[in-house]
């Protein structure tokens, strides 16, 4: 919790004329904040700070794939970043080391869990904006251990929201949810067309799923992320916090340690580079829209800049209808890149798997002007060559630890 008085806030860069002119009332905050009395200059909170104040940008789960890419961009832009991560995901300490070597002092790191409310409170007190990525990220693992999944994803998010609400000047927050909140979509009529599924409905085929789709949490992971997503939206509605949610499809790109459980594009490429066979669950005709991580980082920056406008809203974020691919098509493309086919085994469908999911990103585009720039073929090729050079693959091939341009490949 933060006990700094309002004057200290003003000294922290929230009192310039331009910032004062864009403010939001905090009456609702005052009414509902049970933690302590708020004392904010003029009874207002700054509408936006563009992250340029003396405070830091906090990224929970910031050593992970998406967090590393976002932190790198923010640090390159001269901002100060605090990564809050318990490093529970295998390999992510390599991302952290890479960021630390590249950016040194402007990057701070706190090793802690989102279940540690005291640590979380201290981190949030330093932040002008929060990107909340820390999570149990896989449906498969949530089936093995639903309670841990709930704790990290639902309770961890609630802990964070409470820490944000306790601040005299609550930082804005963007949360990464998932398309899994829409369920397995088995109610959507599909047909197979040349190695891929597609909706029979032409509008869905052309535009994808928008946010009006009914929520239907499937799998413990779908439930825990869905619950967290609802809390994040409700804290904007009920407490007046500045929060927004991205319901994301498949994100891929450098610094991704894809496994069979999560990060399938990277997982396929790592297997291909290792010359190992791949298991396809289902018939391989399932389709996703994939989004290159640099495009996602653009979307995060736009969301933060427009937080006043988009607060309280959820947005479907993915590569959209222009960037769809089926598992079988990815196998074909890998063959094109390598000149050699991968061996694939087929196994039963996985619980709650969607046969077709493509994001309709129109709502976010209309609010911010965002659209993806990196096409699927270009992005997959970039990831392939990045993994070849820096990923866990190379270590296997060379069978020794080494450091390439500051990126340790001992994962
Ligand atoms: N990558 C995708 O395709 C995708 C799609 C939809 C949603 N998401 C969401 O985006 C976010 C980031 O995903 P990612 O792909 O970068 O995953 P990631 O696993 O690479 O990163 C998650 C990070 O959270 C950390 N973490 C896990 N439990 C923690 C805890 N209790 N306390 C603190 N840190 C903890 C991990 O160590 C890891 O560094 C997640 O919330 C995920 O659910 C990702």
Image: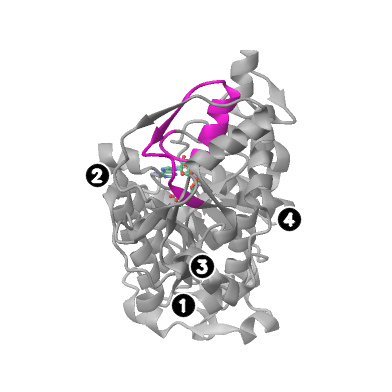
Beta carbon at label 2 within 8 Å of ligand 1: no
Indicate how the structure is coloured in the image.
one colour
Cα gap from disc 4 to disc 3, whole angstroms: 37 Å
Q: Badge 3, how many Cα within 10 Å: few under 14, some, many 20+?
A: some
Alpha-carbon span between mark 4 and mark 1: 30 Å
Element class at badge 1 = loop
Pick whichever of labels 3 and 1 is earlier in the sequence: 1
71 or 375, which lies in front? 375
From the viewer's perspective, tell me whether residue 303 is left or right of residue 346: right
In the figure, 142 relative to 402: above or below?
A: below
Residue at which label 3 appears: 207
Relative image position of residue 388 (x, y in whole percent): 66, 28
Residue 53 colored magenta? no
Q: Do the CB atoms of the residues marked 4 and 3 lie less than 8 Å apart?
A: no
Cβ of mark 1 under 8 A from ligand 1: no
Q: Visible in this render: residue 70?
A: no
Say if 276 sits above or below 21 in the image. Answer: above
Residue occupying the point 50% across, 60% down: 125
Label 2 or label 4, whichever lies nearer to me, is 2
Mark 1 is surrounded, within 10 Å at the Cα level, by few (under 14), some (14 to 19) or many (20 or more) other residues, namely: some
- Tell me the distance, in whole angstroms, between the alpha carbons under discs 2 and 4: 40 Å
Q: What's the magenta region?
A: 260-288
Q: Nearer the viewer, residue 195 or 260?
A: 195
Q: Which residue is mark 1?
A: 39
Neighbour tally class for label 4: few under 14, some 14-19, many 20 plus, Cα within 10 Å: few
The circle on residue 147 is 2
Residue 117 appears in the figure: yes
Q: Position of residue 151 (x, y in %)?
A: 30, 48
For label 4, the residue is 78
């Amino acid at each position: 919790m933060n006990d700094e008085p309002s004057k200290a806030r003003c000294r922290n860069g929230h009192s310039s004329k331009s910032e004062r002119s864009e403010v939001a009332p905090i009456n609702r905050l005052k009414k509902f904040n049970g933690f302590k009395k708020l004392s904010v200059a003029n009874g207002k909170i700054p509408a936006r700070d563009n992250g340029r104040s003396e405070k830091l940008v906090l990224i929970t789960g910031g050593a992970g794939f998406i967090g590393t890419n976002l932190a790198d961009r923010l640090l390159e832009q001269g901002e100060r970043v605090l990564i809050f991560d318990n490093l529970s995901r295998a390999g992510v300490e390599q991302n952290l080391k890479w960021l630390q070597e590249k950016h040194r002092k402007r990057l701070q790191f706190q090793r802690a869990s989102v279940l540690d409310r005291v640590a979380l409170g201290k981190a949030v007190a330093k932040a002008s904006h929060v990107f909340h990525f820390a999570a149990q990220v896989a449906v498969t693992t949530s089936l093995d251990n639903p309670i841990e999944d709930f704790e990290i994803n639902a309770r961890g998010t609630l802990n964070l929201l409470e820490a944000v609400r306790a601040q005299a000047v609550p930082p804005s927050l963007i949360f990464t949810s998932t398309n899994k909140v829409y369920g397995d979509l088995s109610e959507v009529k599909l047909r197979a067309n040349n190695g891929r599924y597609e909706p029979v409905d032409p509008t869905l085929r052309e535009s994808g799923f928008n946010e009006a789709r009914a929520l239907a949490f499937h799998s413990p992971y779908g439930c825990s992320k869905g619950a967290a997503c609802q809390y994040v939206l409700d804290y904007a509605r009920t407490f007046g916090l500045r929060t927004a949610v991205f319901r994301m499809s498949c994100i891929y790109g450098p610094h991704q340690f894809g496994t069979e459980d999560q990060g399938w594009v990277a997982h396929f490429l790592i297997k291909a580079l290792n010359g190992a066979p791949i298991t396809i669950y289902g018939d391989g005709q399932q389709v996703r829209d994939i989004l290159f991580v640099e495009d996602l980082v653009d979307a995060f920056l736009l969301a933060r800049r427009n937080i006043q406008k988009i607060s309280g809203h959820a947005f479907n974020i993915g590569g959209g209808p222009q960037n769809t691919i089926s598992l079988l098509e990815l196998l074909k493309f890998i063959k094109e890149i390598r000149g050699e086919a991968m061996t694939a085994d087929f196994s039963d469908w996985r619980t709650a798997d969607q046969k077709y999911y493509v994001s309709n990103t129109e709502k976010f585009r209309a609010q911010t002007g965002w659209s993806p720039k990196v096409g699927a073929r270009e992005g997959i090729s970039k990831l392939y060559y990045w993994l070849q050079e820096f990923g866990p693959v190379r270590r296997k091939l060379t069978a020794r630890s080494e450091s390439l341009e500051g990126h340790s490949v001992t994962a």
